[in-house]
Amino acid sequence: MIKIAIVDDEERFRDMMENYLKRYAQQKGKEMAVTCFADAFDFLDTSGQGWVMT
């Protein structure tokens, strides 16, 4: 499974990217988990939950 974190302060951009990624995963038959965060602090608070930052 591919885990993707989207971090953006604007909800409309988070939603747009999430929809693009989910559509791509469906078209390609990939298993993907997308999680959205409103800011970097929220994301960093969850960094111990298996996220790999590259």
Image (tube, rainbow, N blue to C red):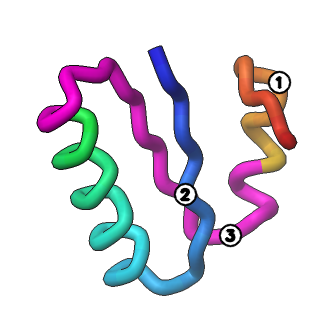
Mark 3 surroundings within 10 Å by alpha-carbon count, few (fewer than 14), some (14 through 19), many (20 or more)? few
Q: Which residue is at 79% across, 29% downward?
A: 52
**Does residue 51 show up magenta in the picture?**
no
Q: Nearer the viewer, residue 5 or 23?
A: 23
Name the amino acid, label 2: Ile
Name the amino acid, label 3: Asp
Cα gap from disc 2 to disc 1, whole angstroms? 16 Å
Cα gap from disc 2 to disc 3, whole angstroms? 9 Å
Q: Nearer the viewer, residue 17 or 10?
A: 17
Residue tagged by mark 1? Answer: 48
Magenta residues?
26-43
Q: Are dots 2 and 3 in contact, CB under 8 Å? A: no
Badge 3 element: loop
Which residue is the extreme one toward the top? 1
Residue tagged by mark 3? Answer: 39
Horizontal side, residue 43 vs residue 4: left or right = right
Asked where in the image residue 7 lies, by quadrant, the reply is bottom right
Q: Earlier in the sequence, mark 2 or mark 3?
A: 2
In the displayed structure, 18 sits above or below 45; it is below
Mark 1 surroundings within 10 Å by alpha-carbon count, few (fewer than 14), some (14 through 19), many (20 or more)? few
Badge 2 element: strand
Q: Position of residue 44 (x, y in %)?
A: 82, 48
In the displayed structure, 50 sits above or below 27; it is above
In the displayed structure, 10 sits above or below 23; it is below
Residue tagged by mark 2? Answer: 6
Q: Earlier in the sequence, mark 2 or mark 1?
A: 2
Q: Position of residue 6 (x, y in %)?
A: 55, 57
Mark 2 surroundings within 10 Å by alpha-carbon count, few (fewer than 14), some (14 through 19), many (20 or more)? some
